[in-house]
Image: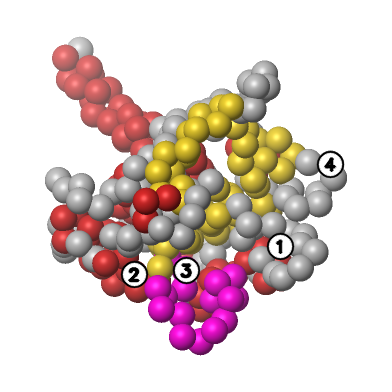
């Protein structure tokens, strides 16, 4: 009887491990995104909530992919593409495999611009740490690419052109799923003037979401000086909506939105060490 009990306990270990591995926070509307190969979440830079929900989306996407498909070309792997300058990529790659410390990673000049627009926040660092953990949890199934233009863009090409070229250079079309986190302008599917990242990648049929909240705060720059970068507060005086994904019938600029209850600003991460 005792031997049978021990066997049953041992047999339960793989099941418990699988449950723990596949456990991701709730994501309202996930099924609406699951059929799309390329999803672009537009964001307000400098919030806690948007990088967090994007990490949840990555978690669910990874847990839905069977490791058995990794042997097939173009399947079994997902790509995450972030609007952070590509010159940080070598440091990111080392940080992801614990070859450099977080302090060394944060010492890169990309993390310390005088004009802090919200992209180099504590929440973004937390997202990168979460992606690092997910890469370790799902070995060989997640690539993380930084696709923004270099800080000194001497080519004169638009930011969206450079980001599109970088995404293509990373073979975005070969991944089973590609998830982008970029500013709200860059994932617009219709513009009267100019061209967005989403438009430049239209051959990959991106599905784009904007983000909304009724009340809260975010970190952003309201002017050209460093002093203009700070927490900004807003209140639309509207009734809070259910949090989750909503699809638009009239797809003028986006295919839909992710509705948040509120936003909370996230300050710059530079100077933060572990």
What residue is at 80 percent from the left and 64 percent from the top?
192
Tell me the CA gap for discs 4 and 3: 31 Å
What residue is at 19 percent from the left and 22 percent from the top?
6
| Sooner in the amino-acid sequence: mark 3 or mark 2 | 2
Which disc, if any, is residue 148? 3
Residue 13 screen position, x and y as percent = 28, 31
Residue 210, compared with residue 243, is above or below; it is below
| Sooner in the amino-acid sequence: mark 4 or mark 2 | 2
Tell me if I can see residue 100 in this picture.
yes
| Residue at which label 4 appears | 249
The answer to which of 228 and 4 lies nearer the viewer is 228
The answer to which of 171 and 75 lies nearer the viewer is 171
- Which one is in front in this view, the residue at disc 3 or the one at disc 1? 3
The answer to which of 228 and 79 lies nearer the viewer is 228
| Residue at which label 1 appears | 205
The answer to which of 15 and 179 lies nearer the viewer is 179
Residue 106 screen position, x and y as percent = 23, 58
Determine whether the residue tagged by mark 4 lies in a helix, strand or loop: loop
Give the residues in magenta.
Answer: 145-162
Residue 251, compared with residue 99, is above or below; it is above
- Which one is in front in this view, the residue at disc 1 or the one at disc 2? 2
Which disc, if any, is residue 197? none
| Sooner in the amino-acid sequence: mark 4 or mark 3 | 3
Determine whether the residue tagged by mark 2 lies in a helix, strand or loop: helix
Q: Is residue 18 left or right of residue 233?
A: left
Residue 265, compared with residue 243, is above or below; it is below
Tell me the CA gap for discs 3 and 2: 10 Å
Residue 60 forms part of the magenta stretch: no
């Amino acid at each position: 009887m005792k031997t049978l009990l021990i066997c049953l306990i041992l047999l339960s270990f793989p099941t418990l491990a699988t449950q723990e591995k596949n456990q991701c926070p709730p994501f309202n509307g996930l099924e609406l995104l699951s059929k799309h190969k390329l999803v672009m979440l537009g964001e307000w830079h400098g919030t806690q909530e948007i990088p967090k929900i994007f990490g949840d989306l990555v978690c669910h996407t990874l847990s839905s992919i069977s490791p058995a498909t990794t042997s097939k070309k173009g399947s079994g792997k997902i790509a995450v593409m972030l609007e952070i300058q590509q010159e940080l990529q070598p440091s990111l790659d080392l940080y992801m495999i614990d070859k450099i410390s977080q302090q060394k990673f944060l010492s890169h000049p990309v993390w310390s611009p005088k004009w802090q627009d919200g992209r180099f926040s504590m929440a973004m660092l937390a997202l990168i740490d979460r992606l690092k953990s997910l890469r370790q949890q799902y070995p060989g199934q997640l690539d993380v690419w930084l696709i923004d233009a270099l800080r000194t863009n001497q080519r004169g090409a638009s930011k969206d052109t450079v980001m599109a070229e970088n995404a293509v250079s990373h073979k975005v079309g070969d991944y089973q799923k590609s998830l982008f986190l970029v500013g709200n302008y860059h994932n617009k599917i219709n513009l009267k003037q100019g061209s967005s990242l989403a438009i430049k990648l239209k051959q990959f049929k991106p599905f784009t979401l904007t983000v909304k909240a009724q009340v809260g705060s975010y970190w952003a720059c309201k002017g050209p000086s460093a002093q203009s970068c700070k927490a900004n507060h807003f209140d639309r005086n509207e009734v809070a909506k259910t949090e989750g994904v909503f699809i638009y019938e009239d797809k003028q600029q986006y295919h839909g939105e992710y509705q948040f209850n509120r936003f909370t600003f996230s300050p710059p991460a530079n100077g933060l060490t572990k």
